Each structure stands twice: as structure tokens, then as C-alpha cells.
Amino acid sequence: MTEFHRATSLGQALELLSQEGPTPTIIAGGTDVMVWKNAGNFHPERVIDVWGVRPQCAGIVDHGDSIGVGAIASYAEIIRNPLVQEHLPVLVEAASEVGAVQIQNRGTLGGNIGGSSPAGDTLPVLLAYDASVVLASKEGTREIPYRDYCTGYRQTVRKSHEMITEVRFPKPSEGTSGSWFKAGTRLAQAISKVMLAGVGEVRDGRFEWVRMGIGSVAPVPLLLDQVSGAVSGQAVSDETLEAARKAAHAQVAPIDDVRSNAEYRRAVAGNMVVRFLRTLAEQ
């Protein structure tokens, strides 16, 4: 039998997480967990529902040099928020493609991070924007760069007594542009075969800098730092784009699964990198 708790404040949630006993499963919108439960693949001993903590963990605030997005902010709230629209348009793009409206009303950014699926649509955006994850416990808080957050397939640095409370995005510099791309079986409401988020700046015919995150091509969402190294400072040219494609092919490590195969994913990863760079050069 599952032991179920419903927290109505952050303090109560952290108190419940600190208690001895079975490792708790945190649930907010439930858009992943309830699917697993209905499929008979999920049998938690202890569940802590934190949807009631939204008043403390669903705000979207301007911290001055960064934008803080509450972990329990829904995708719908992210899409509509003026701060996110102004400073983080690639996050708006990705959130707009997560499921249907019903999922966007319940699904949360913290849930996508907590589930840590390499196919999580918003996770490459966190890499592209160099975001960090705030973890809270009774002992205090700590902030982890998202690039260091995932340690393996659905494995993270979060400890069982900690809860994700906020995601912080450094404000992009003036002149930054970005895009988000996804390949799936259908045009909408499909689990991604490959998705890519990228930001950067082109000046005087050169890629000043670029930063890209990609998903579904490795056990964890992947920062394409080798591609950035091959492109940054280089002229916008076919040679540069081809070098970026080769760097992407070398860095990704896709697998065969029910949605696609490794060869296809590697090819699409290279194509998406080139498509992003071409789009960036035209913006």
C-alpha cells in the first residue's frame, strides 16, 4: 500500500522529505507519474504531493541578472509570462510544444527536470541558456548548474530529502537570438525522437558565440560544447556548417529504441545543428 502525503507549504514538504522511511516520490502535476501508475509500472511506497506548495514555488520573478522560474510553474504559466516571453523566448517555444493544453495546464518545469528523461522537451533549453537548479532541504538550499545536474539515465545529483524549488536562467545579453527544434513521429503531441535548443549571436558575418542543448541522443540531455567550439568565432559559411555537423555526429551517442534508431538520430542531430545555425545567421 502506498503512503500518501499532501503538503500545503514548502516547510511541510521539506519536513516530510526529511523523515526516515521509504524514499519518497514527489508528485506535482502528475502528468508523468499518473501515466506510469495507470500502466501498472509504478508502485511507490511513499508519495508526497507538492501541488499545494504552488504559492511558494510557482512564481516567475526578475532577480536582476537572472529570471527565476518556480519549479511548480506550469507550462501554460511559462508560455503566458511576460518576463519569459521577453528574456527566454526559446523556453516559450519548447513549453508550447509539450503535449496538449491539458498537459500544459498541469505539467511543470520542475517535473520535467525531476523525471530527467533524455527526451524531456524543455531540458535542452536549460542547457542552451546555462540555467541552474535550486534544491531545498531542511538544511538549506544549494544551486547546481543544470549541465552538472544529470549523472546518468534518469539519475541526478538531487538527494532524496531535497526538492527542486526554482530554476534560474541568466538573462541573455543584448543581441542574443535562439530557436528550438523537434523531430517526432507526429507534428504535435509526440515524444521527441530528437530535439535541440540553441542560442547565440552573429555579428559581421561571424558566429560570435553559440550554445546548444540536445535531447534523445544520449543517456542525459547533452550540451553540445564540441559544436560550440567548432563554430564560435568562425565565419558563416558552408565549411563552418559542415564542421558543426561533424562535431555533432562525433559528440552524440544515440541508441535504438521503440521510437527510432541510432543512425537516424545521429543524422537528425547533425541536420538540426545546421538548421539552427542557418536560422541564427538569418535572424
Image (cartoon, helix red, strand yellow):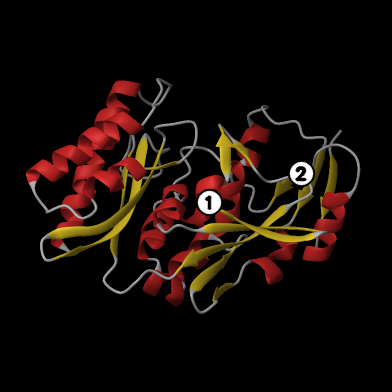
**Is the residue marked by circle 2 packed among few (<14), some (14-19), or many (20+) residues within 10 Å?**
some
Locate the N terminus by quadrant: top right
The picture places residue 149, in percent across and down from the top left corner, at: 57, 46
Amino acid marked by disc 2: Ser
Quarter residue 206 falls in: bottom left
Q: How many marks?
A: 2
Q: Which residue is mark 1?
A: 146
**Is the residue marked by circle 1 packed among few (<14), some (14-19), or many (20+) residues within 10 Å?**
many
Disc assigned to residue 277: none
Disc assigned to residue 160: 2
Locate the C terminus by quadrant: bottom left
**189 relative to 22 in the view: left or right:** left
Q: Residue at x 12, y 54 (%)?
A: 235
**261 relative to 22 in the view: left or right:** left
Mark 1 / mark 2, whichever is N-terminal: 1
The picture places residue 159, in percent across and down from the top left corner, at: 73, 45
- Label 2 element class: loop
Depth check: 135 or 117 in front?
135
Residue extending farthest right: 20
The picture places residue 228, in percent across and down from the top left corner, at: 29, 48
Q: Residue at x 53, y 38 (%)?
A: 117
